[in-house]
């Protein structure tokens, strides 16, 4: 993929050993699984995700002793700035949706075949 090529890896080589992932928000469970599988050496993040974080807050997938790879985790880097950035981003999207008169998506599950 693009990340592997940018890291100087051979096309088709999914391992990212020697690489560091830097993100604003603590990785979720699926991202944490991908981090472990890709063999990243280190994960650096700012804001903790108390609702879905999987790098130490809610779960700790990346440092689970049962797994065959455990990257180093550095958390809280520019935490306030990352949190403010994320809050501003999502507030802006909510405001834009409200300006367009869009409501939250609702699903009529009764209309689906086999659902009562």
Image (cartoon, rainbow, N blue to C red):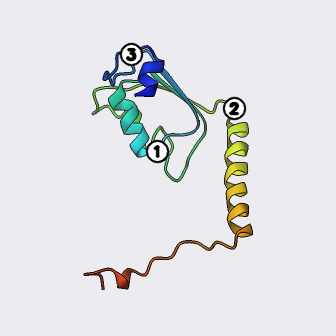
Compared to residue 64, the image places residue 93 above or below, namely: below
Q: Give how far across and how far down residue 55 sits, in percent.
A: 47, 38
Q: Nearer the viewer, residue 101 or 79?
A: 101
- Between marks 1 and 2, how big is the CA–CA gap? 19 Å
Sequence-first disc among 2 and 3: 3
- Whether residue 26 is visible, yes or no, is yes
Crowdedness near tag 2: few (<14), some (14–19) or many (≥20) residues, C-alpha within 10 Å: few
Q: Nearer the viewer, residue 44 or 59?
A: 44
- Between marks 3 and 1, how big is the CA–CA gap? 25 Å
Q: Which residue is mark 2?
A: 78
Q: Can you tell which of label 2 and label 3 is closer to the viewer? A: 3
Compared to residue 1, the image places residue 5 above or below, namely: above
Sequence-first disc among 1 and 2: 1
Crowdedness near tag 1: few (<14), some (14–19) or many (≥20) residues, C-alpha within 10 Å: some
The residue at the far left in this view is 114
Quadrant hosting residue 17:
top left
Q: Which residue is mark 1?
A: 28
Q: Which residue is mark 3?
A: 9
For label 3, the SS is: loop
Q: Give how far across and how far down residue 53 sits, in percent.
A: 49, 45
Compared to residue 51, the image places residue 18 above or below, namely: above
- Whether residue 60 is visible, yes or no, is no
What residue do we see at 53% from left, 72% from top? 105
- Between marks 2 and 3, how big is the CA–CA gap? 30 Å
Quadrant hosting residue 44:
top right
Quarter placement of the C terminus: bottom left
For label 2, the SS is: loop
Residue 5 image label: none
Q: Nearer the viewer, residue 58 or 24?
A: 24
């Amino acid at each position: 993929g693009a990340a592997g090529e940018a890291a100087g890896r051979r096309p088709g080589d999914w391992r990212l050993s020697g690489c560091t992932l830097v993100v604003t928000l603590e990785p979720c469970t699926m991202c944490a699984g991908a981090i472990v599988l890709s063999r990243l050496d280190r994960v650096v993040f700012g804001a903790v995700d108390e609702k879905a974080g999987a790098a130490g807050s809610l779960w700790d997938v990346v440092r689970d002793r049962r797994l065959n790879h455990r990257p180093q985790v550095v958390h809280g880097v520019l935490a306030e700035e990352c949190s403010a950035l994320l809050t501003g981003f999502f507030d802006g999207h909510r405001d834009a949706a409200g300006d367009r008169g869009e409501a939250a998506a609702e699903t009529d599950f009764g209309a689906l075949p086999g659902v009562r």
